[in-house]
Image (cartoon, helix red, strand yellow):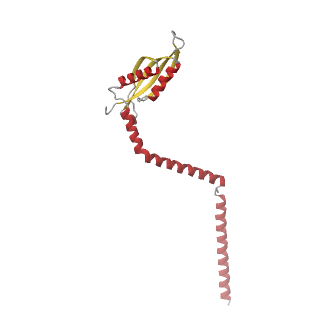
């Protein structure tokens, strides 16, 4: 019976030791868990907002990718609508003269300058030409001329306007127009 008591005593001590070790392990786990950062409601809302933005960006990118063939087709159509390198100066000069005539202005001093070759690989086949011209006329006619440039079949980018009055007629404006036009260099 003394042997059984020693065995029971050892079993109880062993079981109590196991429980004590388990308690220490759970205490350490609980302490470490309390030290780790916990998300607050505000942080959770911020993360949800970021997730929503990312999903919207992904949807926009997928929509853009789906529209890519149409965009490429539109770019090709635009490129083909540009005048060719062989006819660009005469086409632009006649277009600007027609716009000036319809607007009731006088167009003088049209000068063309070619830009240096673009190093942009996306601009292959398209070149740029600078144009300086002077337009004279009443205010409303000059505005009609600028609107005509905007609505023209040719693609113009007006960089700057220098305004002055005519010395011979104070009611007339003289506007120096600095702009750029684009034309096809390949596949003409």
Number of numbered discs on residues: 0
Q: Position of residue 138 (x, y in %)?
A: 51, 17
Please tell me which residue lies in front, 4 or 51.
51
Left or right of 18 in this view: 68: left
> Residue 25's quadrant in the figure?
bottom right
On screen, residue 187 above or below 108:
below
Q: Residue at x 62, y 54 (%)?
A: 44
Q: Residue pushed farthest bottom?
A: 1
Please tell me which residue lies in front, 22 or 49.
49
Q: Residue at x 50, y 47 (%)?
A: 60
- Residue 79 shows in this picture: yes
On screen, residue 12 above or below 96:
below
On screen, residue 71 above or below 30:
above
Q: Position of residue 181 (x, y in %)?
A: 41, 27
Q: Quadrant of the C terminus?
A: top left
Q: Position of residue 97 (x, y in %)?
A: 41, 20
Q: Residue at x 45, y 26 (%)?
A: 149
On screen, residue 140 above or below 39:
above
Left or right of 95 in this view: 173: right
Please tell me which residue lies in front, 5 or 58.
58
- Residue 124 shows in this picture: no
Q: Quadrant of the N terminus?
A: bottom right
Q: Position of residue 168 (x, y in %)?
A: 51, 9
């Amino acid at each position: 019976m003394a042997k059984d008591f020693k065995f029971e005593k050892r079993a109880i001590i062993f079981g109590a030791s196991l429980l004590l070790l388990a308690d220490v392990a759970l205490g350490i786990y609980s302490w470490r868990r309390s030290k780790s950062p916990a998300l607050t409601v505000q942080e959770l809302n911020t993360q949800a907002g970021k997730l929503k933005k990312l999903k919207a960006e992904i949807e926009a990118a997928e929509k853009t990718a789906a529209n890519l063939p149409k965009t490429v087709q539109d770019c090709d159509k635009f490129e083909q609508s540009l005048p060719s390198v062989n006819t660009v100066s005469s086409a632009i000069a006649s277009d600007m003269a027609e716009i000036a005539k319809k607007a009731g202005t006088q167009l003088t001093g049209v000068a063309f300058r070619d830009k240096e070759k673009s190093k942009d690989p996306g601009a292959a086949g398209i070149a740029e030409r600078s144009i300086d011209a002077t337009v004279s006329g009443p205010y409303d006619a000059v505005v009609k001329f600028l609107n005509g440039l905007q609505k023209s079949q040719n693609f113009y980018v007006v960089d700057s306007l220098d305004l002055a009055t005519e010395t011979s007629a104070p009611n007339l404006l003289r506007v120096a127009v600095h702009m750029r036009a684009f034309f096809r260099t390949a596949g003409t």
